[in-house]
Image: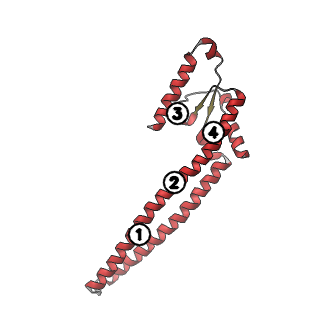
Amino acid sequence: MRNDWKLIIALVMAAALVFAGGAHAEGLKVAVIDINKILNESEAGKVAKKKIESRYEELKKKVEEKQEEAKKIKDEIDKQKIILGKEKLKEKEDALNARIGELRQLTQEAEKEMQTRQGELTQDVLKSIKVKLEKLVADEKIDLVLDQAQGGVVFFNPALDLTARVQVLVNKE
C-alpha cells in the first residue's frame, strides 16, 4: 500500500512537470534508477547481506539446539512412559513444556531481531544511495528521477539509467 502511494505521487509529479508548460517541459531532465539493484549488487549492500546471513545462521543454530533438547526429552518420555510413575512423568512433561516455551520465545525474538537488523542495515545503505544520488542530481541538474523498482517505469532509454553510476559512487564509500 505504501509503495502504491509512492508510485501514484511519482506519476502525478511527473505528469505535473510534463504538463506544466511547453517551454519548461521541453527542458525537463529525467533519469531512472533501480534502487533494489544497487541494494543487492553494491559492496555496501553485499556487506549488509552477509551480516544479516551470518546472524541468521547463529540464531538458527540456537533454535536448532533448543529443538534438539526438546526432542530428546520427548523421546525419553515416549520410551519411559510405561515405567515412569505419574509424578516422574509429570516432571518430564513439565520440562518438555518449558523447553517448548523457551523455543517459541527464542524463535519470536530471533524473528524480531532479524527484521530489525535487516531494516537497520538496509536503511544505512539507502542513506548512502540517497546522498550519492542527490549529489549526482545536483551536478547534472536532473529534474526528476524515477525508481524502476517501484513499477512505474514501463520503458526508458538506457542512457537515462543512473543505477550503475550511483552504484560506483556507493562502492567508493
Residue that label 1 marks? 102
Q: Is residue 14 visible?
A: yes
Q: Nearer the N terminus, badge 3 or badge 4?
A: 4
* Distance from the alpha carbon under mark 1 to that under mark 2: 21 Å
Q: Nearer the viewer, mark 3 or mark 4?
A: 4
How busy is the neighbourhood of tag 4: few (under 14 within 10 Å), some, or many (20 plus)?
A: some
Amino acid on which the number 3 mark rests in the picture: Gly
Q: Nearer the N terminus, badge 1 or badge 2?
A: 1
**What residue is at 70 percent from the left and 37 percent from the top?**
165
Residue that label 2 marks? 116
Q: Secondary structure at mark 4?
A: helix
Q: Nearer the N terminus, badge 2 or badge 4?
A: 2
* Distance from the alpha carbon under mark 4 to that under mark 1: 41 Å
Q: Where residue 157 appears, x then y in whole percent? A: 64, 26
Instruction: Name the foreground residue: 127 vs 7.
Output: 127
Q: Secondary structure at mark 2?
A: helix
Q: Nearer the N terminus, badge 4 or badge 1?
A: 1
* Distance from the alpha carbon under mark 3 to that under mark 1: 42 Å
Q: Are marks 3 and 2 in contact (CB under 8 Å)?
A: no
